[in-house]
Image (spheres, grey):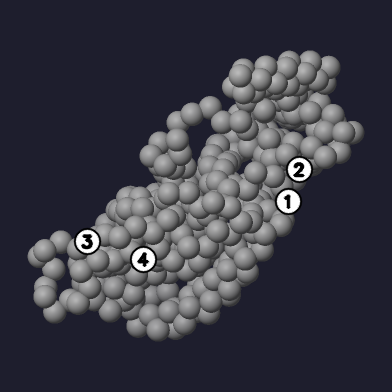
Amino acid sequence: MQKDSGSGATGRLRRRKGSNEVPPEVGKANGSHLLVNDQNKYRSMWIRAYSSIWMIGGFAFIIYMGHLYIWAMVVVIQIFMASELFSLLRKTHEDRHLPGFRHLNWHFFFTAMLFVYGRILSQRLVNTVTSDKFLYQVVGRLIKYHMAACYFLYIAGFVWFILSLKKKLYKYQFGQYAWTHMILIVVFTQSSFTVANIFEGIFWFLLPASLIVINDIAAYIFGFFFGKTPLIKLSPKKTWEGFIGASVTTIISAFVLANILGRFPWLTCPRKDLSTGWLNCDPGPLFKPENFTLPEWIPDWFSWKEIQVLPVQWHALCLGLFASIIAPFGGFFASGFKRAFKIKDFGDSIPGHGGMTDRMDCQFDKCSGFIVLVRFKAIDMVMAVFAYIYHQSFVTPQSVSVEMILEQILMNLSFEEQRALYIKLAQIIKETSQFGES
């Protein structure tokens, strides 16, 4: 007996063998995707909760270990993200005829890594080896020729690519070449700002990253229990109730969390070198408590008339507002991207969450950095970049620092010129001090 052709709506949907393509949703209204209507929502929730607990625990341990370990975590995440994205447009048939072509992707990747982190960490590397004259000279030379070395490594990859071109595969190879460069821009743009935030103080990495996680969790919980109104077609399970509830929760959490994190010098002190020792410094006016008088419209039954507030908490409100309103669009962008390529997730490295890229689509966008947590999908480019720009524009004094001058001296002057500068400065300081005494 033949099956009725009209029964396709209820029959099994066929998928192309070996494909990641998501089968089209058949016979479902837009609202039927909501979590309140999902029959398997509790099973999905427990899988997410279990993997999230492990991610949160590991993330907390790395934060405790310090700046270098957080940086190492970012590097590992970068490698996972790049691996998932490199695989997205691979074609097995073409790759069989291009042995070693995949190594070219990683050549460009590690060249970009050397360039980006060499620029960010050069001064801190110098500060680490100042006590050793030989290492100081070696590091000074490396910093001076760092850009040239990275450029010639890139040129070597460019020549490698040209020599690997094969007839009938030109279009595929040039497509992969362009795709590789786009991946490098996305991955290293967000991560460079994230690492810069880390060394400005873990606070400026941890707070934005935590806000992304809080927003993601709150959106899931409010949508899970109260979601009725679809928010956007790109993500059918996102609801207005989840979005609004998450926004309010994120802004309140930003104000409270900044007060808690801002009281630990380990989190607020900037790291000026690449050592792993415990930090203790003057926190600065942003992290010193001030008394704040509550407005008169506060009800009389509320006994407190003054509260202690850290000035940084007002800045945290801006980060929370940005995280709650703009950050979710990083997730929407990733959802549209996945639908464009007809895939469900970028990978499966995190149970219940998809791949590492799925967790990062929002995080690097907005934070000072990487939020390996429940929905680490926003330490993407938006939050990391915003946190860095906000810190540099509204928090850090706009002045020339000793570190900036020292970096220029080390990069542009020879050792003999540096010694002559040192002698000249010593003379100026001596003359100035004598003049002051007289």
Q: Position of residue 401 (x, y in %)?
A: 56, 31
- Of discs 2 and 3, which sits in the foreground? 3
Name the residue located 62 percent from the left edge and 66 percent from the top edge: 64
Q: Position of residue 129 (x, y in %)?
A: 80, 40
Residue 263's place in the image compared with 406, above or below, is below
Q: CA distance from mark 1 to mark 4?
A: 31 Å
Q: Residues within 10 Å of mark 1 (few under 14, many from 20)?
A: some
Front residue (pair 402, 123): 402
Q: Amino acid at mark 2?
A: Thr
Helix, strand, or loop for circle 3? strand
Q: Which residue is mark 2?
A: 128
Helix, strand, or loop for circle 2? helix
Front residue (pair 249, 23): 249
Quadrant for residue 135, please give it: top right
Q: Are marks 2 and 1 in contact (CB under 8 Å)?
A: yes
Q: Are marks 1 and 4 in contact (CB under 8 Å)?
A: no
Q: Amino acid at mark 3?
A: Thr
Label number found at residue 256: 4
Quadrant for residue 243, please give it: bottom left
Mark 2 vs 4, N-terminal side:
2
Q: CA distance from mark 2 to mark 3?
A: 45 Å
Q: Residues within 10 Å of mark 4 (few under 14, many from 20)?
A: some
Quadrant for residue 389, please give it: top left
Name the residue located 73 percent from the left edge and 21 percent from the top edge: 426
Is residue 401 found left or right of 235 in the rendered image? right
Q: CA distance from mark 2 to mark 1?
A: 7 Å
> Where does the N terminus fall, quadrant-wise?
bottom left
Q: CA distance from mark 2 to mark 4?
A: 35 Å
Label number found at residue 275: 1
